[in-house]
Amino acid sequence: MPQTRKLFHEELDQLHADAVRLAAMASESIQAGTASLLDFDLSAAKAVIAGDKVLDDLTHSIEERTYLLLARQQPMAVDLRMLVTTLRIIHELERIGDLMVNVAKGARRLYPGPLDPKVRGIIDRMRSQATAQLQLASDTFAERDPAKASALEDMDDVMDDLQKELYRTIFAAGAREEAELQRAVQVALLGRYFERIADHAVNIGERVGYMVTGEFKSD
């Protein structure tokens, strides 16, 4: 293999590894952001918000290096799909970090709490579901195995059901006062953030399918 191609594939492998690392950081953000909410830990919430810059910096680094490889090497076929897919996937992961910043800010808005025990339980289950879906999406990309992504849509149905359960619980509480209504809206938004994280995981799986096969999933 010519030296230039060898270096190209080494750089490609590094981009792949860094994207997987970004997924791990996004998963850690899900854990930390949700914990700051459930515990109403404002110091932890502040750390999650500040820590999002690390995710952003790695995202921008991957993006810039990917553009350089595209410009210098003009890759074809599988290598081109790998680079294009990496650009799309890191955007999905960056958005997950942003959504967890929203969750951490939600902890501030709802402070000092507490959350209704049933609401708290549902949000904790949403954390577990979002983490599981992101882990599977990350494994799908890390192993370049689109077959692993086949479960993501079914898993996403679980998250949709959890969101509906959260909404039913909020409505059943029958908030009447202005302050209660505002809290109910904030809790509903939290459910939306977790549901969007699950959607981003599904998108990652679909992008891996294109990366490996060269075909977009048809509904």
Image (cartoon, helix red, strand yellow):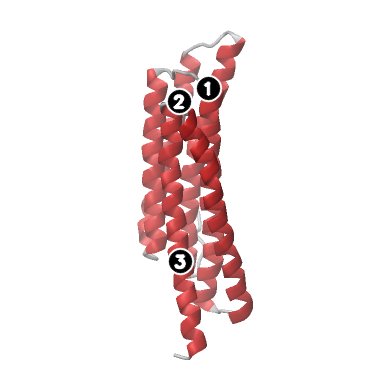
**First reached walking from the N terminus: tag 1 or tag 2:** 2
- Give coordinates of residue 13: x percent, y percent: 44, 72
C-alpha gap between disc 1 and disc 2: 8 Å
1 or 3: tag closer to the N-terminus: 3
Q: CA distance from mark 1 to mark 3?
A: 38 Å
Q: Quadrant of the N terminus?
A: bottom left
**Is 169 situated left or right of 183 in this image?**
left
Label 1: which secondary element: helix
- State which tag comes first along the sequence, 3 or 2: 3
- The residue at which mark 3 appears reads as 16
Residue linked to disc 2 = 40
* Tag 1: amino acid: Leu
Residue at (41, 33) in percent of width and height: 35
Residue for point 59% across, 59% down: 60
The answer to whether 159 is drawn above or below residue 114 in the figure is below
Total labels drawn: 3
Q: Quadrant of residue 21?
A: bottom left
**Are the residues flagged by discs 3 and 2 in contact, CB closer than 8 Å?**
no
Q: Position of residue 105 (x, y in %)?
A: 55, 32
Which residue is identified by label 1?
A: 110
Given residues 115 and 41, the one toward you in this image is 41
**Amino acid beneath label 2:** Phe
